[in-house]
Image (tube, rainbow, N blue to C red):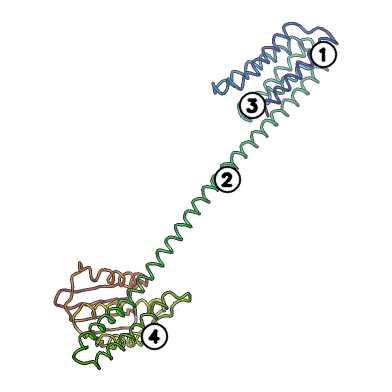
């Protein structure tokens, strides 16, 4: 658009020169030559600037010299002042507003000398005032276009940044969804391990007991089958609770001590594990803390029932201030930390302790039993 405007102004000057030449007086040949050179340089500027970035400085100097030469050679040709318009526009465009307006001021100062080269002072003053006004007007127009172009580029860049931020946010949202799904799967696996694994283990024991008593005591077999049926209903209830849309009720909603006592009764009824409970102190724990401590005790008792080879266990629950603690002890066969049979369960207990900000310590040696100690962190 800016090139079209400068070309249009030059064409208007040529048209006016032709009309002047026919209607008023012949225009000197020198002026026609200078106008031609001015036009050739004008129309070639864009192409040369793309190849030589420093060319606009040389271009502006040459065109200014040509224009000033024409003004001084033919001061009465008032239409030559129109050549200032593209020059003033391009000066600001090429050099920026500060240096561009200085260049325009220099052109105006150069034009003021025409008063001494054939123009009357009234005509010269009019030419200077008109040239100054139009020159600074074109410079201001060029500056406005530059600002508009800069704002357009800034908006384009900001739009690109917004698009990139949107893509990043969309990607982060997808990753968050994947993490949430993975966390939910992990929660389900952990809950299934904590609650359902021991029930399935007890069901397996009931089946084995029923098989052994078929020939020896059929009445005992019926009892084992009834126990197996009860365990099956229990397992089905646990799975439904885990997969239900409504949140699962807190296992320690009646208090941690009573929940562990009920857990001990369930252990005895399912697999004959006798759990002794020692509880001291009275202190209300947050639901999340009580639930995780319950699950830790549940997993520890599950491990004793399945791996320890004993039928006795001790649970110590201390609810004194300032430090509360939970301890599960057995005197069974023990294990090494590298034993894969305890890997997921131990990791689950440690994870639950981290979730509530408690410390957990598991000590076990082959033949010397196991001790799980969970203790509240003091801030």
Q: Position of residue 330 (x, y in %)?
A: 21, 81
Task: Judge from the rendering whether residue 148 lies leftward or rightward of residue 197; answer left or right.
Answer: right
The residue sitting at the left extreme is 367
For marks 1 and 4, the one nearer the N-term is 1
Viewer-proximal residue, 120 or 100? 100
Task: Judge from the rendering whether residue 89 lies leftward or rightward of residue 196; answer left or right.
Answer: right
Q: Residues within 10 Å of mark 3 (few under 14, many from 20)?
A: many
The residue sitting at the front extreme is 215
Marks 3/2 in contact by CB < 8 Å: the verdict is no
Q: Nearer the viewer, mark 3 or mark 2?
A: 2
Question: Which residue corresponds to mark 3?
Answer: 100
Question: Which residue corresponds to mark 2?
Answer: 159
Q: How many marks?
A: 4
Secondary element type, mark 2: helix
Task: Tell me the distance, in whole angstroms, between the alpha carbons under discs 3 and 2.
Answer: 31 Å
For the question of whether residue 325 can be seen, the reply is no
Task: Tell me the distance, in whole angstroms, between the alpha carbons under discs 4 and 2.
Answer: 57 Å
Specify the quadrant that holds the N terminus. top right
Question: Which residue corresponds to mark 4?
Answer: 255
Task: Tell me the distance, in whole angstroms, between the alpha carbons under discs 1 and 2.
Answer: 51 Å
Task: Tell me the distance, in whole angstroms, between the alpha carbons under discs 1 and 4.
Answer: 107 Å
Residue at the image point whose x is 53% and y is 51% from the top: 166
Question: Which residue corresponds to mark 1?
Answer: 19
Q: Nearer the viewer, mark 1 or mark 3?
A: 1
For marks 1 and 3, the one nearer the N-term is 1
Q: Residues within 10 Å of mark 1 (few under 14, many from 20)?
A: few
For marks 3 and 4, the one nearer the N-term is 3
């Amino acid at each position: 658009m800016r090139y079209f405007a400068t070309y249009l102004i030059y064409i208007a000057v040529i048209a006016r020169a032709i009309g002047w030449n026919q209607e008023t007086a012949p225009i000197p040949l020198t002026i026609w030559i200078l106008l031609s050179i001015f036009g050739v340089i004008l129309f070639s500027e864009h192409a040369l600037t793309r190849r030589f970035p420093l060319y606009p400085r040389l271009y502006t100097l040459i065109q200014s010299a040509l224009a000033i030469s024409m003004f001084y050679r033919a001061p009465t040709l008032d239409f030559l002042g129109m050549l200032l318009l593209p020059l003033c526009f391009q000066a600001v465009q090429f050099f920026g507003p500060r240096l561009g307006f200085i260049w325009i001021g220099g052109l105006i100062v150069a034009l003021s000398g025409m008063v001494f080269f054939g123009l009357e002072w009234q005509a010269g003053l009019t030419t200077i005032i008109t040239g100054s006004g139009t020159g600074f007007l074109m410079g201001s127009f060029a500056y406005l276009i530059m600002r508009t172009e800069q704002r357009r580029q800034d908006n384009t860049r900001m739009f690109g940044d917004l698009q990139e931020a949107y893509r990043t946010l969309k990607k982060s949202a997808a990753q968050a969804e994947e993490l949430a799904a993975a966390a939910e799967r992990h929660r389900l696996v952990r809950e299934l391990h904590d609650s359902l694994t021991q029930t399935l283990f007890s069901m397996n024991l009931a089946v084995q007991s029923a098989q052994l008593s078929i020939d020896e005591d059929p009445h005992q077999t019926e009892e084992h089958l009834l126990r197996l049926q009860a365990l099956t209903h229990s397992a089905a209830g646990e799975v439904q609770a885990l997969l239900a849309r409504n949140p699962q009720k807190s296992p320690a909603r009646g208090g941690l001590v009573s929940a562990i006592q009920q857990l001990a009764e369930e252990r005895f009824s399912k697999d004959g594990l006798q759990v002794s409970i020692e509880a001291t102190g009275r202190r209300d724990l947050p639901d999340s803390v009580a639930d995780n401590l319950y699950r830790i005790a549940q997993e520890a008792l599950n491990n004793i029932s399945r791996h320890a080879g004993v039928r006795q266990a001790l649970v110590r629950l201390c609810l004194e201030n300032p430090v509360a603690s939970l301890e599960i002890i057995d005197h069974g066969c023990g294990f090494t930390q590298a034993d894969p049979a305890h890997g997921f369960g131990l990791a689950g207990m440690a994870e639950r302790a981290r979730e509530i900000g408690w410390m957990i310590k598991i000590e076990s040696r082959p033949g010397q039993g196991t001790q799980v100690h969970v203790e509240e962190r003091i801030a």
